[in-house]
Image (tube, rainbow, N blue to C red):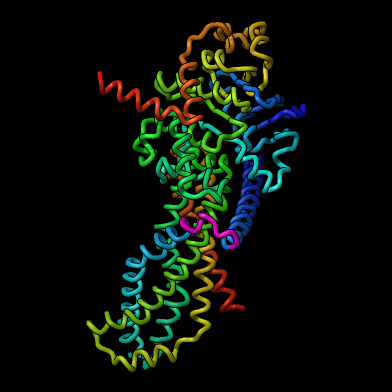
Amino acid sequence: MLDRIGSAAIRGFDEFLYSLGFFVQVLKESALLFRRGQVGFRVLVMQILFTGIEALGIAAAMALAIGAAINLIGSSLLAEFGQGKLMYTILIVVIARELGPLLTAFIVIARSGTAIATELGGMAVGHEIEAYVAVGVNPISYLAAPRFLGVVVSMLVLDIYFNVFGLMGSFAVVQLLRPIGFEEYFRSLFAALAPGDLLLGFAKSLVFGVIISVVSLYRGFAVEGSVTEVPVAGIRAVGSSFMLCILAEVVMTAILYLG
Amino acid sequence: MTGVPELELRGLGSVRGGHEALRGVSLSLDPGETLFVMGGAGSGKSILIKTAAGIALPTEGDVLYKGKPLSRLSRREMTAFRKASGFVFQDAALWSNQSIFDNLALPVRLHEPAWDAAEVERAVRRAAELVGCAQELRARPAELSSGERKLVGLARALVLDPELLFMDDPTSALDEASAARVPGIVDSLKSRGRSILIASAVSEFSSRCADSIAVLLDGRLAAIGSYAEAAAWTDPLVRGVTGRLKPRAAEAWTGGLAGAWVNAVADGTAMAEEKSEDKGKDGR
C-alpha cells in the first residue's frame, strides 16, 4: 500500500517537473516565434480564428443572458432594500471580475482545449509529430507556441467581448422586459466601474489562457501510440483545465480579498 | 574517406513504457554503406532506427553523426543534420492537414528558404516522379491508399536528396509493383554514394540491396557483419531471421529496371521517355 502511494507520489512529482519543463520550453519558443517570424504565424492566426472569433457567438449569448439576469434580479431585489445603486457594482464584479473570465475559460476549455489535445493526440498516433522532428521542425516551436499564444490572446479578446456584451449589451435585453433610462444606466455603470476591476479580470483571463493552453498541449503531446489514448487526452485536458482554472480563481480572489 | 563513420551507435539503450526495447546496441554506418537491420516483429528495429535518426531519445548510449554526438549538436548543426538526412516512416506519417504537394514542399521551404516557388515546385515534382506519385500532388493524404501514402513518405524523405537515409520497413503496405520499385531507388541512391540505414524483415529486399546486415533479437544486437559474412552465421535464432537471404547472383526482384528509371528521372530524361511510351500505347 505504502509502496503504491510512494510510487504514485514519485510519478506525480516527475510529471510535475516534466510539465514545468514543457511550460518553460513553450514560453521560450513563443518568444522566439516573434523574433523568427516563421511559418508558425499561420497556425497562430488559425488558432485565434478558432478560439477567439468562432467562439464569439456563444460567449456573447452567455454574457447577454447573465448580464440581463443580474440586471433584472438586481434592480428589483436590491430596490426593496433601498440599495438599487449596488446593482451596478454587482454587475461589474460578477461580469468583469469574477464570472466573466471563468465562464470564458469554460467556453475555451470546452471548444479549444479538447480540440488541441485531441488534434495533437491524433498527430502523435499518426507519427506526424515525429515526421516534423525528422525534417527539422521543432514541434514545440511549430505546433505548441502558436497554439499557446493563440489561446492566450483569444482568452483576452473573448473576455473583452464578454464584458462588452455583459455590461452594455444586456442593457438592450433588459429594455425589452423592464425599461431603465439609458443615461441613468450608463452613468451609474461607469461610476461603479474601477479600472482595477477590469485589470483583474484581464489578469485572470491571461492566467486561465496559459493554464488551458499548456494543459491541453501537454495532454496532446503525451499521447504515445494508441488511438484510444486520444479521447482520454481530451477528457484529461478538460478535467485538469477545469480544476486548475477554478483553483487559480480561488487563489487570485483570496489574494484580492485577504491580501 | 576520412575513416569516421557517417553514423555510429554506441551502447544504445531504450526503455519504452517500462519495457527495455533496446539493450546496448552498438553499430556503425560508413559513408556510402547500406546497412539492413533485420529482426522479427517487436525486436526493436523501428525504435533503433528512430533513435539513430534522433527522432527518439535513447535512455542510454549515444548516436554520433560524423563523430559528434547528436545530443551535443548546436541548433545550427542539428539543422544541417536534418537537411542532410531523410526518414521514411513505416506508416508514411504524412501531415494529414496538408496537401501532398505541401507535404513534400515543407522540408524544401524549411531548409532552402532562398528558393523561389518554381525551384520548390521543381524539387517536389522531381521527388514525386522518382517514386511515381506525381499525379497525386493536389490530393490530401486521406484521399490516397496506404501504399500511395507510403510512396509519398518516401518522396518526402528524398526531396532534398539527402546524403543519409533512414528507412523503416519501406516496402510494407506497398503493392507488388511499388514494392519492386523501392530496391531500384535504393540501388540508385547507393550508386550516388548515399549512406542508408534500413529496418526491414523482407529477405528479398535485403538480398538485393544490403552491404551489411545487423540482426536484432529482443532489443539486443545478435549479429552484425557484411552481407557475405551473414551466410556463415550459425546461431539458430539469427538464422531464423537471415535464413531466407538469397545468394547475390539471384535477381528475383525487378528493381534493376526501376533503378534505371530512377537514374533517368535524376538526369531528367524519364518524363520524355514516359511521354513517348504513352504515345506508343495510344498508337496501339
- Location of residue A60 (image quadrant): bottom left
**Dominant secondary structure of the magenta stretch?**
helix
Q: Position of residue A156 (x, y in %)?
A: 47, 70
Tell me which residue sits at (48%, 17%) in the image.
B255
Per the image, is A38 magenta?
yes
Tell me which residue sits at (33%, 93%) in the image.
A183
Q: Nearer the viewer, residue B143 or B91?
A: B143
Determine whether A117 is above or below B207 in the image.
below
- Which of the image's four quarters has the N terminus of chain A? top right
Q: Is residue A141 left or right of residue B69?
A: left
Q: Position of residue B202 (x, y in %)?
A: 52, 16
Residue range corresponding to the magenta coloring: A35-43
Determine whether B149 is above or below B182 in the image.
below
Q: Is residue B60 left or right of residue A204?
A: right
Q: Is residue A64 left or right of residue A211?
A: left
- Location of residue B168 (image quadrant): top right
**Does residue A7 appear in this view?**
yes
Q: Position of residue A33 (x, y in %)?
A: 57, 59
Tell me which residue sits at (44%, 47%) in the image.
A118
* Extreme residue toward the right, this view: B3
